[in-house]
Amino acid sequence: FRNAFDEFDPEKIALYDSDKVNTLLQNSGIIRNRLKIQATINNARRYKEIVEEQGSFSDYIWSFVDGSPILNKWQYMQEVPATSGISDRMSKDLKKKGFKFVGSTICYAFMQAAGLVNDHTTDCFRYNQP
């Protein structure tokens, strides 16, 4: 994916045209779904708009958690949710801004990956690490 999408550079992806979409549709190393490829291009363009409006995408995203990570206290993996009220709001706002394929579950997974929420169980060695 990284190679196919120019190292995930939004400046480059935002400039993709129909020829690039067709090339990507022939790339067996990625999910070859036209709607998802087009959404990636669209989302790169929307990303750039947020950067222009907000100063940075990071500031925008972190505003959903008031700039501080949420530290949950789960004891068991079964307790970890797939969505939250915050991921619901994030998804809704991103969709309002024109993003595609940004449902609440995707947003919550992003929040976990980016450190906006810590869902390590309390017995995990990573739980208390920043």
Image (tube, rainbow, N blue to C red):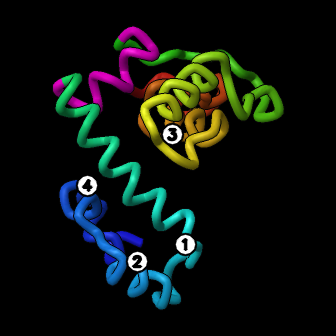
Cα–Cα gap, marks 2 and 1: 7 Å
Picture residue at 48% right of the left edge, 57% below the top: 39
118 and 53: which is toward the camera: 53
Quadrant showing the C terminus: top left
Rendered location of residue 15, percent (x, y): 23, 64
Residue span colored magenta: 55-66
Q: For the residues carrying marks 4 and 1, which lies nearer the camera in this image?
A: 1
Q: Which disc is residue 122 wearing?
A: none
The residue that mark 4 highlights is 10
Picture residue at 48% right of the left edge, 67% below the top: 37
Disc 4 marks which amino acid?
Pro
Circle nearer the N terminus (3, 1):
1
Cα–Cα gap, marks 3 and 1: 22 Å
Cα–Cα gap, marks 4 and 1: 18 Å
Q: For the residues carrying marks 2 and 4, which lies nearer the camera in this image?
A: 2
Using the rendered view, name the quadrant where residue 53 is placed: top left
Q: For the residues carrying marks 2 and 3, which lies nearer the camera in this image?
A: 2
Using the rendered view, name the quadrant where residue 36 is placed: bottom right
Instruction: Give the crowd class for mark 1: few <14, some 14-19, many >=20 residues within 10 Å.
Output: few
Residues at circles 2 and 3 in contact by the CB criterion of under 8 Å: no
Picture residue at 32% right of the left edge, 23% below the top: 60
- SS assignment at label 4: helix
Residues at circles 4 and 1 in contact by the CB criterion of under 8 Å: no
Cα–Cα gap, marks 2 and 4: 15 Å
Q: Main secondary structure of the magenta part?
A: helix
Looking at the image, is 65 positioned above or below residue 8?
above
Q: Is residue 78 left or right of residue 73?
A: right
Q: Which disc is residue 34 wearing?
A: 1
How many numbered marks are there? 4
Circle nearer the N terminus (2, 1):
2
